[in-house]
Image (cartoon, helix red, strand yellow):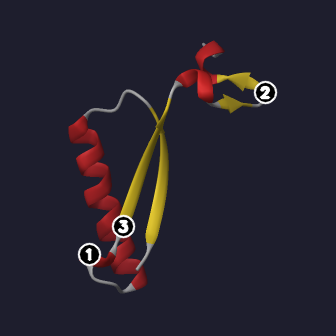
Amino acid sequence: MPILQVHLLKGRTADQKRQLVREVTEAVSRSLDVRPDQVRIILSEMDREDYAIAGTLVADRS
């Protein structure tokens, strides 16, 4: 049973997350030859001040 964790910045709508998990499930099911009901996805949302790129908080980037 594949278990995937996806980290996202907060701000996505429920519809966007639904589409994401639907499409990721399809891709994983196809590529690993497992049934869709075997795919688990954990969405972890982060605040912009809890994530940095190249030493700069995303909240501070323009």
Q: Position of residue 60 (x, y in %)?
A: 64, 13
Considering depth in this image, is 47 or 55 the residue closer to the camera?
47
In the picture, measured across the screen, residue 45 lies left or right of residue 33, that is right
Q: Residue furthest left?
A: 15
Measured along the vertical axis of the image, is residue 13 above or below residue 5? above
Q: Which residue is mark 3?
A: 40
- The amino acid type found where label 1 is placed reads Pro
Q: Looking at the rendering, in which quadrant would you find the C terminus?
A: top right
How far apart in space, not on screen, are marks 1 and 2 (Cα)?
Answer: 38 Å
The reply to whether the C-beta atoms of the residues labelled 2 and 3 are less than 8 Å apart is: no
How far apart in space, not on screen, are marks 1 and 3 (Cα)?
Answer: 9 Å
The reply to whether the C-beta atoms of the residues labelled 1 and 2 are less than 8 Å apart is: no
Of the image marks 2 and 3, the number of the one nearer the N terminus: 3
Q: Residue at x 29, y 44 (%)?
A: 17
- The amino acid type found where label 3 is placed reads Arg
Measured along the vertical axis of the image, is residue 14 above or below residue 61? below
- Counting other residues with Cα less than 10 Å from the Cα at mark 1, is it few (<14), some (14-19), or many (20 or more)? some
Q: Residue at x 27, y 32 (%)?
A: 13
Q: Which residue is mark 1?
A: 36
- Counting other residues with Cα less than 10 Å from the Cα at mark 2, is it few (<14), some (14-19), or many (20 or more)? few
Measured along the vertical axis of the image, is residue 56 above or below residue 29? above
In the picture, measured across the screen, residue 61 lies left or right of residue 14, that is right
- Per the rendering, the mark at residue 55 is 2
Q: Residue at x 55, y 23 (%)?
A: 48
How far apart in space, not on screen, are marks 2 and 3 (Cα)?
Answer: 32 Å
Q: Position of residue 56 (x, y in %)?
A: 73, 22
